Amino acid sequence: MKQYLELCQRIIDEGVWVENQRTGKRCLTVINADLTYDATTHEFPLVTTRKSFWKAAVAELLGYIRGYDNAADFRRLGTKTWDANANQNDVWLNNPYRRGEDDMGRVYGVQGRTWAKPDGGHIDQLRKIVDDLSKGTDDRGEILNFYNPGEFHMGCLRPCMYSHHFSLLGDTLFLNSTQRSCDVPLGLNFNMVQVYVLLVLMAQITGKKPGKAYHKIVNAHIYDDQLELMRDVQLRRSPFPSPRLSVNPDIRSLEDLETWVTLDDFQVDGYECHEPIQYPFSV
């Protein structure tokens, strides 16, 4: 929470107003922020100065792991986070590659599980990483990359958090996640959860110990219509102690994550928080 609140305050104190072309809104913006989550302490990085709907963040991560490309599949997992981008983005609605209602196109997990090869076929990036780590192999390139400029036109949204780089030191797994753009009042709440859970899950299914996750944000911003709520409401609240996350120990493989795992396999204990804040969402 200290890292999160310090970033929010830094944006308010040091941020520069930038016009965002995609949303047509102004953003108070800073460049470069680094957050660290220590999985060895079991402290779950949940925002406590407003209610965090962490289950939706975990559901979205599961959808990425499974390579889903349809908002209906994400809804079945337990999150509606892709409904707006799939169905309310005018540019995407008029895109010839859109295949109908709820279609997201080739975004996020699609790239991670079926990256198209120029000579035909696909690359399953995540499968390769899991296989290597399970054997104790770290080739310094255990990178899950969602950023494919050659297929931006085939999806409803460019990835924000686009790279996850796993590293082994002995039997301890580390993660460096890079995010090009972050809506701090809304998105970061999800992103913190997903970086932490991804490290924990990957360590568990490869038989490693989870270490630290390092989360780099390049462009961190607060939208104009979010600023008052952040400055006058959320930042005036005192944070509560961090809760703890428990993951079903029966999850032992990538196939488990692809098939039977649900939100019931994740439990958060000791979560105290303030009332929700309804921040505006920019499509």
Image (cartoon, rainbow, N blue to C red):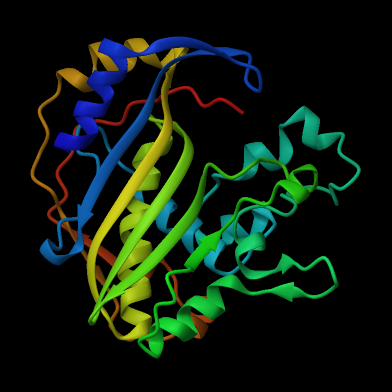
Along the line of sight, which residue is nearer the eye, 77 or 174?
174
Q: Is residue 169 left or right of residue 198?
A: left
Depicted 277 relative to depicted 64: above or below: above
Q: Quadrant of residue 32?
A: top left
In the rendered view of the protein, which quadrant contains the C terminus? top right
Q: Is residue 151 left or right of residue 234?
A: right
Q: Quadrant of residue 253?
A: bottom left
Query: x, y percentage for residue 188?
Result: 37, 38
Q: Is residue 53 visible?
A: no
- Residue drawn at x 72%, y 31% as measured from the top left: 89
Depicted 7 relative to depicted 227: above or below: below
Along the line of sight, which residue is nearer the eye, 145 or 101?
145
Q: Is residue 150 left or right of residue 144?
A: right
Query: x, y percentage for residue 78?
Result: 49, 57
- Residue drawn at x 37%, y 73% as measured from the top left: 202
Query: x, y percentage for residue 71?
Result: 65, 52
Residue farthest toward the bottom in the current orientation of the protein:
135
Along the line of sight, which residue is nearer the eye, 269 or 24?
24
- Residue drawn at x 28%, y 57% as measured from the top left: 213
Q: Is residue 124 visible?
A: yes
Residue farthest toward the right in the current orientation of the protein:
96
- Residue drawn at x 23%, y 49% as measured from the top left: 36
